[in-house]
């Protein structure tokens, strides 16, 4: 699989109903290019859920914006966790809520609020 094929912009009716929208995200090879992807956002600007392509098919990847603890890498979106897409977006969003709602949840990176020009976010999902 080539890097540009990592993100998936095909939006199913079920994903659209769950609040996903197609928007530009950073190109896997780095800035300044972007590629379209199906993205789910909510009231937390430091996290997003992105539809990607994995070895076994569609995967929904939780991404967090910030800097890894070592600090040598730049601010950006980093993969934090993923769930297989074969169970559908409803199941994935339930797992996402469970993951983020854990009392001891801590992001793998030092979270930051993305600047206004960083990967334009998808419209906020309805709840």
Image: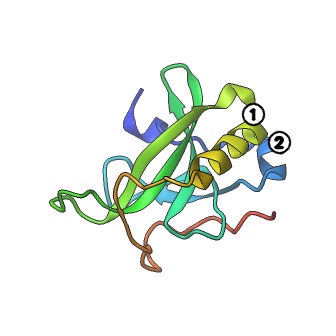
Q: Residue 6: x and y, percent? A: 47, 37
Residue at the image position 53 percent from the left and 32 percent from the top:
53
Residue at the image position 69 percent from the left and 68 percent from the top:
123
Mark 2 sits on what residue?
A: 14
Residue 68 left/right relative to 60: left
Q: Quadrant of residue 13?
A: top right
Residue 116 left/right relative to 41: left
Mark 1 sits on what residue?
A: 88
Q: Looking at this view, is 63 or 27 the one in front?
A: 63
Callout 1: few (<14), some (14-19), or many (20+) C-alpha neighbours within 10 Å?
some
Q: Which quadrant is the N terminus positioned in?
A: top left
**Is label 2 in a helix, a strand or a loop?**
helix
Q: Looking at this view, is 9 or 79 the one in front?
A: 79
Choose mark 1 or mark 2, whichever is in front.
1
**Is label 1 in a helix, a strand or a loop?**
loop
Q: CA distance from mark 1 to mark 2?
A: 8 Å
Q: Which quadrant is the C terminus positioned in?
A: bottom right
């Amino acid at each position: 699989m080539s890097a540009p094929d990592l993100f998936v912009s095909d939006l199913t009716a079920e994903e659209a109903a769950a609040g996903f929208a197609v928007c530009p995200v950073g190109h896997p090879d780095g800035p300044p290019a972007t590629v379209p992807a199906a993205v789910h956002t909510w009231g937390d600007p430091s996290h997003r859920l992105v539809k990607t392509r994995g070895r076994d098919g569609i995967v929904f990847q939780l991404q967090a914006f910030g800097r890894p603890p070592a600090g040598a890498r730049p601010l950006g979106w980093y993969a934090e966790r993923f769930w297989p897409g074969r169970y559908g977006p409803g199941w994935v969003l339930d797992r996402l809520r469970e993951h983020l709602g854990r009392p001891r949840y801590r992001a793998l990176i030092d979270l930051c609020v993305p600047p206004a020009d960083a990967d334009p976010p998808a419209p906020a999902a309805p709840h």
